[in-house]
Amino acid sequence: MVQFANARLDASFGALSDATRRGVLEQLARADASISDLAATFHMTLTGMKKHVGVLEQVGLVTTEKVGRVRTCRLGVAGLEAESDWIARQRALWTARFDALDKVVENLKAKERDDGSDK
């Protein structure tokens, strides 16, 4: 069996599978924020938000910088390019398959019309 596993994609899609983490990315797309601010925004404990940020940080979607007592989060440089490329390839594959299926259905309908007009 061919192995298509890509550890980076597995980890990033795993990170993105959580609604809170997707919300953190959306929040950070608007502006950098401290972990305390993110915890307050999402009504969760500081410890809980640190875990979410840690998961996002491990896959490069978020970076943190500690200045004094405040840890500021911002979107990571990795972005979602690899993930969006994978999704685009899958979309192209499925679009081609649905187009081929449409042609088969059209041919069957045309054949059915032709068979019906012969009677």
Image (cartoon, rainbow, N blue to C red):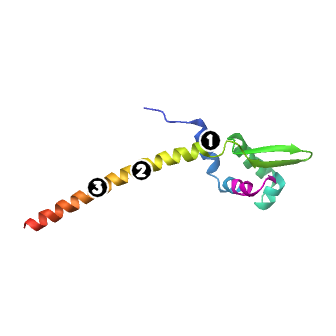
Q: Amino acid at mark 1?
A: Ala
Apparent side of residue 89 relative to residue 34 in the rendered image (left or right): left
As measured in the structure, the alpha-carbon distance from the residue carrying label 3 to the one carrying label 2 is 14 Å
Which residue position is annotated with label 1?
11
Identify the amino acid type marked 2: Trp
Magenta-highlighted stretch: main secondary structure? helix
The quadrant of the image that shows the N terminus is top left
Q: Give the labeled residue for mark 2.
A: 94
Q: Earlier in the sequence, mark 3 or mark 2?
A: 2
Q: Label 1 to label 2, Cα distance in Å?
A: 24 Å
Q: Residues within 10 Å of mark 3 (few under 14, many from 20)?
A: few
Could you tell me residue 108's position as x and y percent?
A: 22, 58
Task: Check if residue 31 falls in the magenta segment.
Answer: yes
Q: Residue at x 86, y 43 (%)?
A: 66
Q: Is residue 117 left or right of residue 57?
A: left
Helix, strand or loop at mark 2: helix
Kindly indicate whether the residue at mark 1 contacts the one at mark 3 (C-beta within 8 angstroms): no
Q: Secondary structure at mark 1?
A: helix
102 relative position to 54: left or right = left
Q: Residue at x 72, y 44 (%)?
A: 76
Callout 3 amino acid = Lys
The answer to the question of whether label 3 and label 2 lie on touching residues, with beta carbons closer than 8 A, is no
Mark 3 or 1, nearer chain start: 1
Q: Callout 2 environment at 10 Å: few (<14), some (14 to 19), or many (20+)? A: few
Q: Which mark is residue 41?
A: none
Q: Which residues are magenta?
A: 24-33
Q: Which mark is residue 103?
A: 3
Of helix, strand and loop, which one carries label 3?
Answer: helix
Q: Earlier in the sequence, mark 1 or mark 2?
A: 1
What residue is drawn where x is 12% and y is 66%? 116
Percent coordinates x, y for residue 96 in the rendering: 38, 50
